[in-house]
Amino acid sequence: MTDKVEQKLKPWQHVVAAGVGGAICAFAVCPLDVVKTRIQSQTHFVTAGHNQLTPHFTGVIDAFIKITRHEGIFNLWRGLTVSVLLTAPGTAIYFACYEALKKKLHVLDHWNFSVSGVLARSVTVILTSPLELVKTNVQSHNRHTGLVHIIKNASREKNYKTLWVGIMPTLLRDVPFSALYWPLYEFLKSIFTNRLRLKPDTLVHFSSGALAGSFAAAVTTPVDVIKTRVQMGVDLDSRKTHNVFKTAMTIFREEGLSGFAKGLVPRVVRVTPMCAIMISTYEFLKSLMLRSAL
């Protein structure tokens, strides 16, 4: 779809296409999201009869098996409601902002994609951070961590900053992700369509999104671990929060550099299809709405 053709689409059509794509993604990758969060949030413990540190989950497959066996298969979709509430409007805001900024900042040439992605993602993170906090806590199996509970505690303590706990590591994760993802996605798409002479269809969007998403996800995994630990460490019934730097130093001191790679596989496995499904669904729905308007 060319830029001139895309200009015929209205802002609300971008919002609808992105929102629907986000909801589909939230459902499809929720089990991987739960596994990733559980692996990243677990700390070491002393096993019975052994004076040594052992992780609760030894890997992705082990986590899938243990969660299904001890909690039931439906717990792999734990936090689905809040995930949809986060992902659908979040992607709608993100993609709508990205499309609008891309048009406004076209003078930046090749930097356009990175700058537009960074700005759009920053706005989205700021607006959706409270829901991200709830999702992380629900999926990690904490109790009494609903959005209403968190808001009530924040109001009682007059500490509304609690609602945005983890926003700094989230920005440190998502801003570089967007800076890497969008230019790489656009580059891969141009390779497929211009050099390989492929039709810019759903398969091209899917493949470009998957490759760009997997690379960006792998690079930003260490910050994702820090974000999860910061949001897990918040005391929802008090003013206590966890500092990003202190959390990073604690991970390094207790688990070494390997601690920052926790959840790498489930994160990449989760983000890869998520980016692929999201961008291909988004582009497909845009083309449908465009054809119906002609």
Image (cartoon, rainbow, N blue to C red):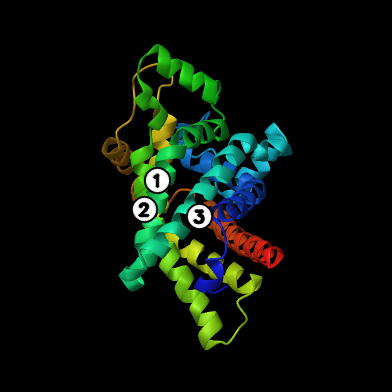
Mark earlier in primary sequence (3, 2): 3
Alpha carbon separation for disc pair 2 and 1: 6 Å
**Quadrant, the N terminus:** bottom right
Establish if 246 lies above or below 286.
above
Q: Is residue 246 visible?
A: yes
Residue at image mark 3:
95
Question: Residue lying furthest top in this view?
Answer: 156
Q: Amino acid at mark 3?
A: Phe
Q: Residue at x 59, y 38 (%)?
A: 85
Whether residues under marks 2 and 1 lie with C-beta atoms below 8 angstroms apart, the answer is yes
Residue 225, percent across and down? 41, 44
In the foreground, 40 or 82: 82
Residue at image mark 2:
119
The quarter holding residue 294 reads: bottom right
Please tell me the numbered disc located at residue 123: 1
Circle 3 — which element? helix
Label 3 packing within 10 angstroms: few (<14), some (14-19), many (20+): many
Residue 164, percent across and down? 39, 32
Residue 34, percent across and down? 58, 41
In the foreground, 174 or 272: 174
Determine whether, in the image, residue 68 is placed left or right of residue 165.
right
Circle 1 — which element? helix
Residue 261, percent across and down? 42, 52
Label 1 packing within 10 angstroms: few (<14), some (14-19), many (20+): some
Q: Residue at x 57, y 35 (%)?
A: 139
In the foreground, 237 or 72: 237
Q: Residue at x 56, y 71 (%)?
A: 5
How many numbered marks, from 0 up? 3
Alpha carbon separation for disc pair 3 and 2: 11 Å
Q: Amino acid at mark 2?
A: Leu
